[in-house]
Amino acid sequence: MIVTTLLFYLFAAVLIIAAFRTVTSRNPVTAAMHLVLSFFTASMLWILIHTEFLGLLLVLVYVGAVMVLFLFVVMMVDVNVEQMAAGVRTYLPLGLVIAAIMVAEMAFVLIHTWWDPSRPLPQPPADFNSTRAIGETMYTDYVFAVQISAVLLLVGMVAAISLALRRRTDVKRTIPSEQLRAQPSDRLRLIQMPARTDRRVDRSSQGHDASGDSQ
């Protein structure tokens, strides 16, 4: 029990520091790496309370897939850090309000738990299947909440696609279909022009010739 408590406080401290660095870091890559550390530490905390399925799901889905994809996007896309930092002050009050609400909610849950310690977490039996219990709970008691979450994720996906499809004026785009339909006659055009001679050049050349003859 003492080892579990020490691990909890250790993982909680690492999670708080990593989350703080995720919010305050100016480099997107550094913020993403700290977010990966936050997810990994949160999964360790879930494993400590005997929810192994959620812990492994957090590591495999978020750390192994979502954050790796996010890192590739951040490193491949030319992110203007100065332009992003310029808009921080605009959204800072709203961010502080949301952060205060989240801290108040977590404080309410923690204080309620500390004031009523007579209800400890029940220890599951040896043959307890957490995956089945989570599935039955999600699709029986919280089926409406799951559907709302699915709709929110769909809206977020559509919003991300619409933002990615914006027309940028500073990017030169290529259209492969037009390149495949191109013909040599479209790229090279031969023009026949009549030969012209400059009179000044002819007169100057005649003058040089006459001076040479007089000598």
Image (cartoon, helix red, strand yellow):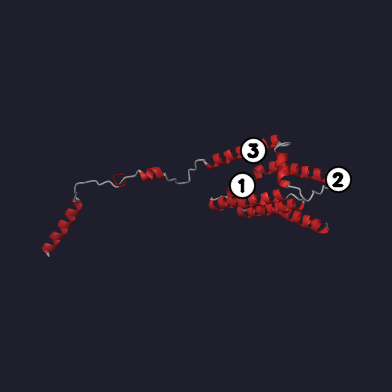
Could one spot residue 24 in this view of the protein?
no
**Front in this rendered view, residue 37 or 30:** 37
**Circle 3 sits in a helix, a strand or a loop, which is it?**
helix
Q: Which mark is residue 119?
A: 2
**Circle 2 sits in a helix, a strand or a loop, which is it?**
loop
Could one spot residue 125 in this view of the protein?
yes
State how far apart marks 3 and 2 are (Cα). Answer: 33 Å
State how far apart marks 3 and 1 are (Cα). Answer: 33 Å
**Circle 1 sits in a helix, a strand or a loop, which is it?**
helix
Q: Which quadrant holds residue 44? A: bottom right
Amino acid at the residue labelled 1: Ala
User: Which quadrant: the C terminus?
Assistant: bottom left
Q: Which mark is residue 86?
A: 1
Q: Which mark is residue 150?
A: 3
State how far apart marks 1 and 2 are (Cα). Answer: 49 Å
Q: Which mark is residue 199?
A: none
Number of numbered tags placed on the structure image: 3
Amino acid at the residue labelled 2: Arg
Point out the tag, 1 or 2, that comes first from the N-terminus: 1
Contact (CB < 8 A) between labels 3 and 2?
A: no
**Front in this rendered view, residue 48 or 72:** 48
Contact (CB < 8 A) between labels 3 and 1?
A: no
Quick one: which residue is furthest to the top in this view?
Answer: 144
Q: Residue at x 75, y 41 (%)?
A: 101
Amino acid at the residue labelled 3: Ala
